[in-house]
Image (cartoon, rainbow, N blue to C red):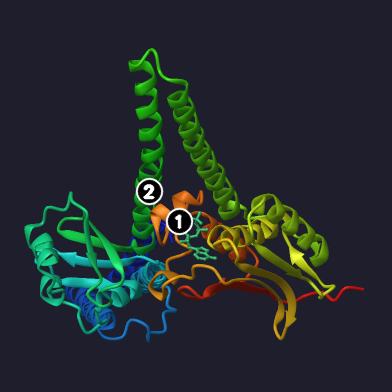
């Protein structure tokens, strides 16, 4: 009801009430006493209503049946309405807060809220996992007491949060965490802890790769530079020396070219998310491997046997498969002395079709085997550069096999020979 209408009805009721009192007073000839008693009755009734309202507000606001149309009823309804509105607002706030907490709890980064005394106010489940915190057990505990790493304690106590702190997780030392703290509100702070193990590993790999490539290019460039200086310094260079210089420069440029080509192949294989998969006929693939091997053997005294009695097919990328197989055959040729025997076989095995290259050449010491597929890894640098090796061949094989859900198996014994093999699963029987 609008305020002015309430006031008007209240005044009308009072006027009517006092008119009635006047009439009663006139009738009994006791006007002043009647008005006094009437006023006292009004005061008492209103004092009682006032006490009732106070009791109702403080003790049981929801129980009262609010129906009467008096101005006290108007007060009851007003208070009741604002209580209900408050209750609704509180419900909405609680729902919003729990939604926010659920969201923060689902974050992959650890989140810890703490105050200026470093006492923990809240933490999400990733923070519990990364930092070994307990919730709600650690509520109110000091962050710098719970995480005892010296550098971390200094970071929190010093409060210079412009820095980013990188430390191993106190819970699992193989996980590297990056901590950032931001202040908000009057005296609150939020710390986010991100798992940067993979990023860090990638960064190290990138740095190592740049260092390796620079190192690999340094030797051929130094040789080229040396001969170029010799040519420019000595105007009347003997034809024999000219021949030696150009021959050596040719070898080094070929080496660099081969390295760049292999790096490009590797990068293409590593980044090819959509490998073109076709049906590869083993016999056709073997013919291509044979062609490559024949060119490489040239007039060397090596006996090489190709066995592909499985008239099978596999599914995969033909260009990548040829690159992997040819790399393995090329290694067997390059690391076997004249008079050796090499066997290249495609055969059915229990879990698919196996490709293997076996030689009775130099063999490899067991400590090197797990590193052979790393970029630029060579067992013997001098021997590898004599044979034209770049240390990238087995890396290429490894990545091709990753793209074909397979792994390279290496069995080798020094001076006995080596066997490199892999299995391509799920073969489709040739029709
Ligand atoms: P590279 O271009 O140097 O041959 P790879 O990645 O193909 O590089 O091979 C890595 C190293 O593994 C080679 O440097 C060589 O020492 C060794 N290796 C590979 N295949 C054979 C093999 N069949 N016999 C002996 N050693 C081998």
Q: Provide the residue designation for mark 2.
A: 212
343 horizontally vs 49: left or right: right
Which secondary structure, mark 2?
helix
Coordinates of residue 339 in the picture (x, y in percent):
60, 65
In contact (CB < 8 Å): disc 2 and disc 1: yes
Coordinates of residue 234 in the picture (x, y in percent):
35, 16
- Residue at image location 64% in from the left, 62% down from the top: 302
Q: Provide the residue designation for mark 1.
A: 375
Mark 2 neighbour density, 10 Å: few (under 14) some (14–19) many (20 or more): some
- Residue at image location 70% in from the left, 57% down from the top: 322
The image quadrant that residue 126 belongs to is bottom left
- In this rendered view, identify the residue nearer to me: 27 or 182: 182
Q: CA distance from mark 2 to mark 1?
A: 8 Å
Figure label count? 2
Residue 4 seen anywhere in this rendered image of the structure: no
Mark 1 neighbour density, 10 Å: few (under 14) some (14–19) many (20 or more): many
Residue 293 seen anywhere in this rendered image of the structure: yes
Q: Quadrant of the C terminus?
A: bottom right
- In this rendered view, identify the residue nearer to me: 431 or 295: 295
Residue 234 tag number: none
Coordinates of residue 350 in the picture (x, y in percent):
71, 86
Which secondary structure, mark 1?
loop
- Residue at image location 22% in from the left, 76% down from the top: 34
Coordinates of residue 157 in the picture (x, y in percent):
7, 62
N-terminal-most mark, 2 or 1: 2
Q: Quadrant of the N terminus?
A: bottom left
316 horizontally vs 125: left or right: right
In the displayed orientation, state which residue is furthest to the right: 431
């Amino acid at each position: 009801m609008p305020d002015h209408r309430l006031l008007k009805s209240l005044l009308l009721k009072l006027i009517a009430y006092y008119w009635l009192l006047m009439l009663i007073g006139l009738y009994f000839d006791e006007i002043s006493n009647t008005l006094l008693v009437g006023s006292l009755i009004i005061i008492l009734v209103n004092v009682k209503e006032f006490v009732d309202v106070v009791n109702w507000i403080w003790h049981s606001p929801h129980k009262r049946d609010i129906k009467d149309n008096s101005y006290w009823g108007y007060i009851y309804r007003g208070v009741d309405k604002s209580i209900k509105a408050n209750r609704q607002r509180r419900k909405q706030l609680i729902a919003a807060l729990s939604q926010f907490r659920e969201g923060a709890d689902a974050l992959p980064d650890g989140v810890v809220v703490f105050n200026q005394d470093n006492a923990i106010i809240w933490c999400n489940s990733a923070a519990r996992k990364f930092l070994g915190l307990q919730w709600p057990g650690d509520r109110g505990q000091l962050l710098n007491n719970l995480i005892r790493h010296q550098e971390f304690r200094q970071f929190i106590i010093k409060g210079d949060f412009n820095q980013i702190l990188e430390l191993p997780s106190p819970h699992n030392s193989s996980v590297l965490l990056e901590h950032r703290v931001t202040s908000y509100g009057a005296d609150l702070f939020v710390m986010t802890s991100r798992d940067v193990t993979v990023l860090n590993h990638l960064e190290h790999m990138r740095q190592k790769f740049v260092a390796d490539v620079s190192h690999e290019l340094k030797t051929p460039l130094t040789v080229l530079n040396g001969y170029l200086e010799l040519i420019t310094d000595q105007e009347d260079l003997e034809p024999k020396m000219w021949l030696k210089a150009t021959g050596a420069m040719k070898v080094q440029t070929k080496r660099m070219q081969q390295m760049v080509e292999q790096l490009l192949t590797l990068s293409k294989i590593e980044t090819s998310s959509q490998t073109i998969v076709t049906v590869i006929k083993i016999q056709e693939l073997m013919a291509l491997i044979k062609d490559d091997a024949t060119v490489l053997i040239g007039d060397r005294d090596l006996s090489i046997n190709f066995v592909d009695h499985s008239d099978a097919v596999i599914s995969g990328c033909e260009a990548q498969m040829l690159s992997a197989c040819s790399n393995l055959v090329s290694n067997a040729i390059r690391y076997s002395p004249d008079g050796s025997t090499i066997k290249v076989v495609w055969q059915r095995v229990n879990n698919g079709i196996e490709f293997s290259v076996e030689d009775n050449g130099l063999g490899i010491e067991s400590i090197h085997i797990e590193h052979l597929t790393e970029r630029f890894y060579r067992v013997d640098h001098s021997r590898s550069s004599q044979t034209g090796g770049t240390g990238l061949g087995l890396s290429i094989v490894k990545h091709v096999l990753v793209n074909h859900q397979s792994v390279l198996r290496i069995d080798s014994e020094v001076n006995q020979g080596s066997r490199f093999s892999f299995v391509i699963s799920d073969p489709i029987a040739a029709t």
